[in-house]
Structure formats: C-alpha cells, structure tokens
C-alpha cells in the first residue's frame, strides 16, 4: 500500500513539478518517474520524499529538490552512449537518475559513509552501471576520462581545472559557481581547447570541498 502511495507521488512530481515547469526531455522525465526517491532519504524524511524541496541526508549534505535534479540532467543533453562523471555522490539519487539515461556513471564522493550508503542502494535496485569511489571530487576521476558529461553537485568558487581537462571534445560540464554573492548554475562546453560558458539560473548548494574548491572553511 505504501509503495503504491509513493508511485502516485512520483507520478504527481513528474507531472506538476517537472513537466509543467519546463522539463521536456522525455528521457529525463522517464528516469525521474522510475527512480524511487524515497529509498535515497533517511527514514525520518521518507514521507517528504516527493516534496519540491531539498532534504537533509545527514553529514551536512542534502538531496536536491526534484526540479533541480531534472533541470541539471536535462541541461547536459545526454545521449544513451554517454559516459558521465558525477562529482558528489551524496545520497545517490542524482547518480541513479543519470544511470537510467546513459551508458555509465562514475561518481566520486569525499565522505566514505555516503558513498557506502549509495552503493548499498544501487545494489538493492540492481543499478549495475554506476561506479563509485571515495576521494577529492575537485580532482575528478582521471582513470576513466574523458567524459562526455560532468555534473558537479556542490558549489565551487571556480571551475576546477582537472574537471575541464577530463571533458571529452564536445563534452558538457554543469556546476554551481559562486558569483557576485550568489550561486549560479553554469554550463560549460568544450570545443578543442576552448570552453564556452553559459549562465543558466541561480541556485543553492552545499560547498564543494577539495584542493580545487573550498578548503573546508565554509
């Protein structure tokens, strides 16, 4: 019975929070409709899984609101053959959504507890195309580069150079960037050795901690 309720809430989320607010990529909508968001939040947050807001997942981290998850995913213009790097595994929800669209997802998280938790959920759901590691996300995961797309799920003061270097030709990178006392989602596209940067919208994320981000002082 409870599962049925969550399925109804998921359908409502896709129709009202996403489709009605400009999310048009059918692959993204299908992924959002299939991934059970309720299993990626702590038990005490379960009843709020499909509310249109970010939720705490502990350790000072959050699971982004459904709209921002869908918006960032859509902005990357993903293709089924793409290989994607996710910086900031967090609860695992964003990576799960990506995995329903692309060939492979490589996700790096600096907090071992979060990475382990996401891995258990992926195993239970049978999501076998997501690969996890623990480390400094600002340095990327060079062993599997280049990536067709890179998604950074924490706000950075700059675009980390290692991530730019790990983009494939024609690759896209999306990240929240500190800008004029606010945070703005930026979409970066690599063309040869040039990087085109487009400002998308204001947002709010936890800080990106690492060598090429913030240094733990926020």
Image (tube, rainbow, N blue to C red):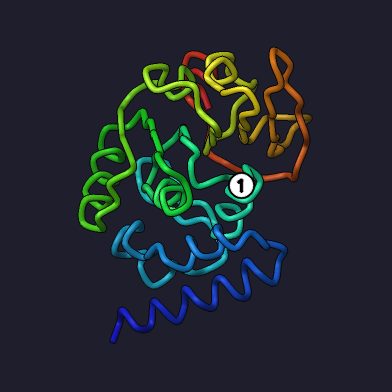
For image coordinates 67% across by 61% down, the residue present is 23
- Give residue 144's position: percent from left, percent from top: 39, 22
Looking at the rendered image, the quarter that the N terminus falls into is: bottom left
Q: At numbered mark 1, what does the secondary structure look like: helix, strand or loop?
A: helix
Q: Is residue 184 above or below residue 98?
A: above
Q: Is residue 169 above or below residue 127?
A: above
- Give residue 49's position: percent from left, percent from top: 43, 66
- Between 218 and 104, the one nearer to me in the picture: 104
Residue indicated by mark 1: 72
- Give residue 172's position: percent from left, percent from top: 63, 32
Q: Is residue 149 above or below residue 216?
A: below
Describe residue 76's horizontal placement relative to residue 118 as left or right.
right
- Between 147 and 42, the one nearer to me in the picture: 147
Describe residue 11's horizontal placement relative to residue 118 as left or right.
right
For image coordinates 27% across by 47% down, the residue present is 128
Label 1 Cα neighbours within 10 Å, binned few <14 / some 14-19 / many ≥20 = many
- Give residue 169's position: percent from left, percent from top: 62, 22
Q: How many marks on residues? A: 1
Quarter of the image holding residue 180? Answer: top right
- Between 80 and 63, the one nearer to me in the picture: 80
Describe residue 5's horizontal placement relative to residue 189 as left or right.
left
């Amino acid at each position: 019975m409870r599962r049925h309720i969550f399925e109804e809430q998921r359908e409502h989320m896709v129709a009202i929070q996403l489709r009605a607010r400009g999310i048009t990529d059918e692959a993204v909508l299908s992924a959002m409709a299939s991934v059970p968001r309720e299993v990626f939040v702590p038990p005490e947050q379960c009843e709020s899984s499909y509310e249109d807001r970010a939720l705490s997942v502990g350790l000072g981290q959050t699971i982004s609101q459904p709209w921002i998850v869908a918006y960032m995913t859509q902005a990357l213009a993903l293709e089924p053959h793409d290989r994607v790097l996710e910086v900031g595994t967090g609860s695992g929800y964003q990576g799960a959504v990506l995995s329903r669209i692309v060939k492979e997802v490589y996700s790096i998280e600096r907090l071992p507890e979060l990475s382990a938790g996401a891995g258990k959920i992926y195993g239970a759901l049978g999501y076998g195309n997501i690969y996890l590691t623990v480390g400094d996300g600002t340095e990327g995961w060079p062993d599997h580069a280049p990536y067709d797309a890179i998604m950074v799920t924490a706000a950075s003061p700059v675009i980390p150079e290692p991530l730019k270097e790990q983009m494939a030709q024609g690759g896209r990178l999306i990240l929240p960037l500190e800008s004029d006392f606010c945070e703005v989602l930026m979409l970066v596209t690599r063309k040869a050795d040039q990087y085109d940067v487009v400002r998308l919208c204001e947002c709010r994320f936890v800080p990106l901690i690492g060598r090429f981000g913030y240094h733990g002082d926020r």
